[in-house]
Amino acid sequence: MKFFVDTADVDEIRKANDMGVICGVTTNPSLIAKSGRKFEDVIKEITSIVDGPISGEVKATTTDAEGMIKEGREIAAIHPNMVVKIPMTVEGLKAVKVLSSEGIKTNVTLIFSANQALLAARAGATYVSPFLGRIDDISGYGIDLVRQIADIFDVAKDIHTEIIAASIRNPIHVTDCALAGADIATVPYKVIVQMTKHPLTDAGIEKFQADYKAVFGE
Ligand code: E4P
């Protein structure tokens, strides 16, 4: 399983990129709004930091296929690494069909059922993004959705759409997604840092330092 970082904060993106663990970025309208910057400015800066797929979403207020296709073409024109994020609706599927026929990569977002993922794949989506954390938030088992989609895509054989496990909230989500067969997990920077930690690693470093200093000094 590969990692993307899920943020529009360029400092976080730089830090995650410097660690060498991420190969792409996902953003959404809420994350862009949180950055307080203009969509185009943030996205351009992100493309200059990470050399991999960068998901930029159509405007939250654009709900018709025609509008999403127009915006999708504009987003794709920003940089060759751009992936157009489209919400999972009938209009969204229509937009995915047109954009994918033009060679534009798409990421169908807000996936909450296996059927939605299957439809998105058949419409030509490059990626589907099941949101497991939001399912857990309402007392469901988000990881079951990721596993179902991975199984269905495996059985189908002719589906090449990749699964981006999204709405990741903690390190256990990441492990579960890797085991469930997600191709990619898009992970908030904070969770990437949490994943580096283990109390035995810290204790081990302290002990090595103490033993070394006891014999050789500083
Ligand atoms: C993914 O593409 C989404 O941007 C993101 O993972 C949503 O996460 P949230 O449910 O924590 O907002």
Image: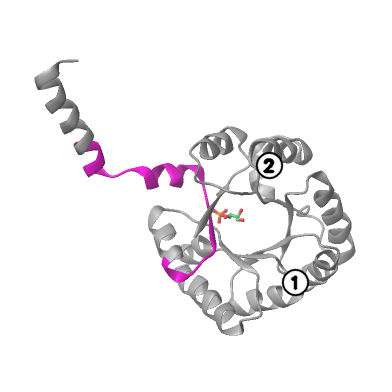
Question: Picture coordinates of residue 214 (x, y %)?
Answer: 10, 21
- Asked if the magenta segment contains residue 202, the reply would be yes
Which residue is at a point 76% across and 74% down the rendered structure image?
123
Identify the residue position indicated by label 2 in the image.
33
Residue depicted at 64% across the width and 64% down the height: 110
**First in sequence: mark 2 or mark 1?**
2
- Camera-side residue of 42 and 22: 22
Residue 119 at x, y percent in the picture: 70, 78
User: Is label 2 in a helix, a strand or a loop?
Assistant: helix
Residue ranking furthest to the bottom: 155
User: Dominant secondary structure of the magenta stretch?
Assistant: helix
Horizontally, is 90 left or right of 6 in the view?
A: right
Compute the Cα span from label 2 to label 1.
29 Å
Q: Is mark 1 within 8 Å of ligand 1?
A: no
Whether 85 is drawn above or below 31: the answer is: below
Q: Is residue 27 magenta?
A: no
Residue picked out by circle 1: 124
Q: Is residue 112 above or below residue 175?
A: below
- For label 1, count other residues whose C-alpha is less than 10 Å away and answer few (under 14), some (14-19) or many (20+): many
Place of residue 153 in the rendered image (x, y in percent of width and height, measured from the top left): 59, 78
The single residue placed furthest to the top in the displayed view is 218
Tell me the residue at 38%/58% (across/down): 172
**Identity of the amino acid at label 1?**
Gly
Q: Type of residue at label 2? A: Ala
Query: Which residue is outermost to the left?
Result: 215
**Which region of the structure is painted magenta?**
179-203
